[in-house]
């Protein structure tokens, strides 16, 4: 295991469990002469205790840090949309139009002489956190220049309020629903989602299981939830949920295959299905010292796109398209079942971000760790920082940044249509993922020789990828724009004129 | 999947109001549609028969919540035609400013509602942010945020407040900048293009045969704008031209209808900026509600059987009020009021336009026609 640090929870737990188990075995079985397997009992018990404690620790970390995901989902998108939520509402108490105070001196109506201190607080707030420039104050809502505490805590407390609301809601089942399947579908979705985290290592000293096939197992578990979605869509006995479930099945089938082939390419490149070994392969002391992102840029792109489709976020949220299908396959669910399914959606998104960080961004390795430590003047400082921050922190920061990318995509893009999603998946992503797999094979078989990668290889691949990306971004057909060509015309029947089709 | 009917509505995110669209689908493809209107019929025409001419304005505001000013102005011009009232030029300019600001606000509401229809909430929030600028300006004029009750027979409620021209100019310049943000968000996004281009074709000839007007028919390349074809108010004194799209042979698609409205917002902003410069001073624009001089004369001016009528370019098309005077028998009240709502004609047409497309195109096509149910059901 590479990259040891002081936060070696698993080491501590293993040591303690071993000591306790040895002691227990000594004091119980060791006293008797009937059962001679003292060592086996001690090691088995130590393993069991370690696993239970570590699994609890990993889930605790995940469930605590998912708050950051929800916070990004609320606050970052609010920032992108110029929408501040509660912050704006609070601020409107002391900021008026045209750079003035709030025009109504509401605090003067307060009883018991409360008005004067509140009025002075108001004055202070308006002086320090009010508007300054005239142009910035043209409107109450035009507060994009405001750099106040938009990042403060209230967004998190909202989650607690939502949870309370879900808990207290009545459980309603549609009259003609298939009751057994209807109740069973959320169980499938939620349990498989939580199970995914059993095999995600969060750091060199913080993981629940170190299986040889952890990546494969994770992908298998990840693929069960769509079945639950389809069950939910069918069992609700509602046309919207039925269409949503069908869409979900079609979409997830189309995107699971490129996803798996991309994952396979990473496994091929790293020579292992074990996530910890994949991370080690990207670290400097034990592997190639280059993040997979710089070796398989196509793979990283494919993984990002297919994962967004897997977790059904915009632009690929066809199954729950609220504009036409109300809420798609979960229209008929309510209360805590709905809340848990929504939470499991965020858990899946979190798992996707963690997986991306583990497979392509070097896992828990700090960015350019060795290069920064090797710098002449400031190397020592970086060394101290890298020693101080546990490696788990780097993994979490990477996955949070990735989730911010998810949110950015959601704020910037629209929803794609069903046929377009499927066409994109089958006609572009699948061939690209095969190309990516071929590149991975070539790199592993012909280029890679144990030890660090030659610096030219990632440099060459990354340069090509950046140039291709730039061309793709700048490619704009001026003539087509001028001619107002419509390249995306899709109509499956030839008659669209009103009244033309009336059998 | 076999063919089945889905009833979208009366409460459904696609409807933008309260109506039902019954859709017959074959898998994901729409093969037939049937609109069902009339859920919020309030009998405005009948109510108006029991109100005097100055009170009807308030009801006309309620015809469309997104575009209240244009509807009350549509009524006012018909009433002035019936009662033969002269309007001072300054009042006409103020009316034009109010209506064009309202048109911008209405189109912003449309664009804001259209973006979530195809899956983007950012557009909604951005559009409502700029709509707030327009609402503040209209609030300065009319006194409230949604239903202004601003025009009066023979003028407007009150003169422009002090400093209005400056604030209006600053906000419109900000708005004209921000339109470019929408275009960066929408026109440069391939997903927006593949969702709107080549979807929901509507030919100009078909639309004219059905009686569709307004931005929808201008998107199909037919230059019919009442403000341009039959200039009322002071529209012919300003330098402007109707926004027009160059559609393909198959007709206008959703993207054309989006473009024409964005261009129209620009044109309206320019009109307001021009009229802020050109507006003459001096004339009296203030009339008390229920002006006794006006109402006592109504009896003789609107004689039995005499009619008042006016075309008006609403934000959604051509709206008309047809008033019949009551004469001695009914005094200050009209004998009959008839309202032409552009959306009442457009919604059945639009719901036939989506045959042959996918379910996901239903909100994209329906939203691009800018439905407003308040005026449809009246």
Image (cartoon, coloured by chain):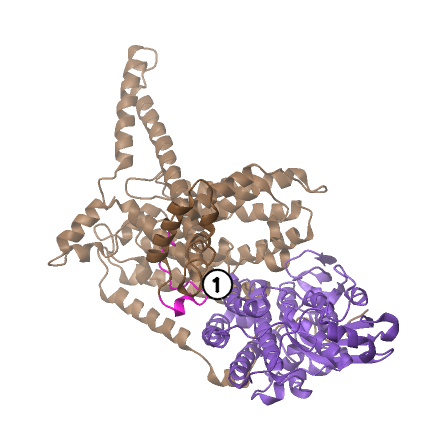
Horizontally, residue B80 falls left or right of residue A470, namely: right
- Chain identifier of the brown chain: A
Range covered by the magenta-colored residues: A133-151
Q: Colour of chain B?
A: purple
Name the outermost residue toward the left: A377
User: Does the magenta stretch mainly form a helix, a strand or a loop?
Assistant: loop
User: Compared to A374, does A50 lie above or below?
Assistant: above
Q: Is residue B83 left or right of residue B222?
A: right
Q: Is residue A476 left or right of residue B153?
A: left
Q: Which residue is mark 1?
A: A430
Q: Is residue A150 magenta?
A: yes
Q: Chain of mark 1?
A: A
Tally of marks = 1
Q: Is residue A220 visible?
A: no
Q: Position of residue B289 (x, y in %)?
A: 68, 69
Residue B9 sits in quarter: bottom right
Quarter of the rendering containing residue A368: bottom left
- Relative to A417, say whether A25 is above or below: above
């Amino acid at each position: 295991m590479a990259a040891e640090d002081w936060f070696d929870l698993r080491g501590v737990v293993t040591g303690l469990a071993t000591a306790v188990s040895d002691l227990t075995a000594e004091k119980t079985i060791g006293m008797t002469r009937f059962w001679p397997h003292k060592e086996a009992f001690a090691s088995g018990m130590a393993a069991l205790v370690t696993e239970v404690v570590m699994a609890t620790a990993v889930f605790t970390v995940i469930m605590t840090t998912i708050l950051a995901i929800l916070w990004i989902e609320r606050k970052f998108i609010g920032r992108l949309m110029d929408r501040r939520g509660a912050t704006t509402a609070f601020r409107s108490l002391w900021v008026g139009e045209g750079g003035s105070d709030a025009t109504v001196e509401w605090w003067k109506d307060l009883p018991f002489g409360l008005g004067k201190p509140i009025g002075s607080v108001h004055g202070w707030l308006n002086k320090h956190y009010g508007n300054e420039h005239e142009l910035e104050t043209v409107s109450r809502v035009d507060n994009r220049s405001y750099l106040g505490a938009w990042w403060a805590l209230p967004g998190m407390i909202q989650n607690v309020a939502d949870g309370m609301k879900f808990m207290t809601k009545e459980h309603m089942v549609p009259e003609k629903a298939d009751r057994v399947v209807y109740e069973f579908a959320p169980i499938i979705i939620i349990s498989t989602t939580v199970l995914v985290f059993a095999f995600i290592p969060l750091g060199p000293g913080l993981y629940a299981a170190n299986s040889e096939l952890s990546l494969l197992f994770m992908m298998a578990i990840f693929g069960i939830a769509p079945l639950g979605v389809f069950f939910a869509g069918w069992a609700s006995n509602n046309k919207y949920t039925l269409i949503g479930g069908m869409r979900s099945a079609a979409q997830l089938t189309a995107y699971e295959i490129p996803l798996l082939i991309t994952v396979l390419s990473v496994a091929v490149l790293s020579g292992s299905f074990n996530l910890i070994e994949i991370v080690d392969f990207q670290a400097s002391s034990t592997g190639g010292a280059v993040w997979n992102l710089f070796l398989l840029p196509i793979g990283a792109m494919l993984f990002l796109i297919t994962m967004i489709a897997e977790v059904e976020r915009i632009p690929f949220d066809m199954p729950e398209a609220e504009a036409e299908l109300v809420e798609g396959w979960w229209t008929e669910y309510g209360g805590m079942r709905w809340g848990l399914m929504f939470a499991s959606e965020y858990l899946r998104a979190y798992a996707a971000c963690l997986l991306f960080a583990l497979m392509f961004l070097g896992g828990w390795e700090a960015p350019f760790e060795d290069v920064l430590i090797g710098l002449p003047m400031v190397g020592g400082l970086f060394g101290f920082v890298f020693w101080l921050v546990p490696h788990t922190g780097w993994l979490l920061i990477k996955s949070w940044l990735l989730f911010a990318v998810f949110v950015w995509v959601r704020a910037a893009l629209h929803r794609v249509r069903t046929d377009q999603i499927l066409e994109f998946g089958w006609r572009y992503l699948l061939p690209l993922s095969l190309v990516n797999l071929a590149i991975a094979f070539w790199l592993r078989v012909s280029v890679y020789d144990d030890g660090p990668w030659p610096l030219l290889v990632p440099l060459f691949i990354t340069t090509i990828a950046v140039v291709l990306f730039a061309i793709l971004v700048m490619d704009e057909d001026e003539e087509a724009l001028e001619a107002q060509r419509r390249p995306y015309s899709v109509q499956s029947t030839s008659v669209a004129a009103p009244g033309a089709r009336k059998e | 999947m076999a063919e089945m009917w889905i009833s979208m509505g009366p409460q459904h995110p696609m409807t933008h109001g309260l109506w039902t669209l019954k859709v017959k689908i074959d898998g994901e493809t729409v093969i037939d549609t049937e609109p069902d209107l009339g859920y919020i019929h309030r009998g405005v025409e009948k109510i108006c028969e029991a109100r005097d001419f100055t009170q009807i304005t308030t009801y006309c505001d309620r015809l469309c919540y997104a575009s209240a000013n244009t509807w009350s102005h549509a009524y006012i011009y018909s009433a002035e035609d019936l009662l033969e009232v002269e309007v001072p030029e300054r009042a006409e300019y103020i009316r034009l400013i109010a209506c064009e600001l309202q048109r911008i606000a209405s189109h912003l509401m449309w664009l804001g509602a259209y973006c979530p229809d195809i899956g983007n909430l950012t557009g909604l929030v951005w559009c409502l942010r700029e709509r707030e600028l327009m609402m503040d300006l209209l609030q300065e004029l009319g006194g409230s945020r949604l239903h202004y009750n601003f025009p009066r027979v023979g003028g407007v409620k009150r003169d422009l407040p002090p400093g209005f021209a400056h604030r209006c100019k600053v906000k419109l310049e900000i708005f004209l900048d921000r339109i470019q943000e929408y275009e960066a968000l929408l026109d440069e996004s391939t997903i927006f293009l593949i969702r709107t281009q080549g979807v929901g074709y509507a030919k100009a000839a078909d639309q004219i045969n059905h009686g569709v007007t307004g931005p929808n028919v201008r998107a199909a390349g037919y230059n019919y704008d009442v403000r341009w074809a039959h200039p009322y108010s002071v529209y012919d004194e300003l330098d402007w031209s109707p926004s027009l799209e160059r559609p393909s042979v198959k007709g206008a698609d959703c993207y054309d209808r989006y473009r024409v409205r964005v261009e129209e917002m620009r044109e309206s902003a320019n009109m307001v900026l021009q009229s802020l410069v050109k507006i003459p001073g001096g004339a009296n624009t203030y009339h008390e509600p229920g002006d006794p001089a006006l109402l006592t004369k109504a009896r003789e001016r609107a004689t039995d059987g005499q009619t008042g009528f006016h075309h008006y370019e609403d934000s959604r098309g051509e709206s008309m009020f047809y008033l019949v005077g009551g004469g001695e028998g009914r005094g200050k009240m009209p004998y009959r009021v008839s309202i032409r709502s552009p959306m009442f004609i457009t919604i059945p047409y639009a719901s036939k336009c989506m045959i042959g497309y996918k379910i996901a195109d239903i909100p994209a096509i329906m939203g691009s026609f800018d439905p407003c149910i308040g005026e449809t059901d009246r």
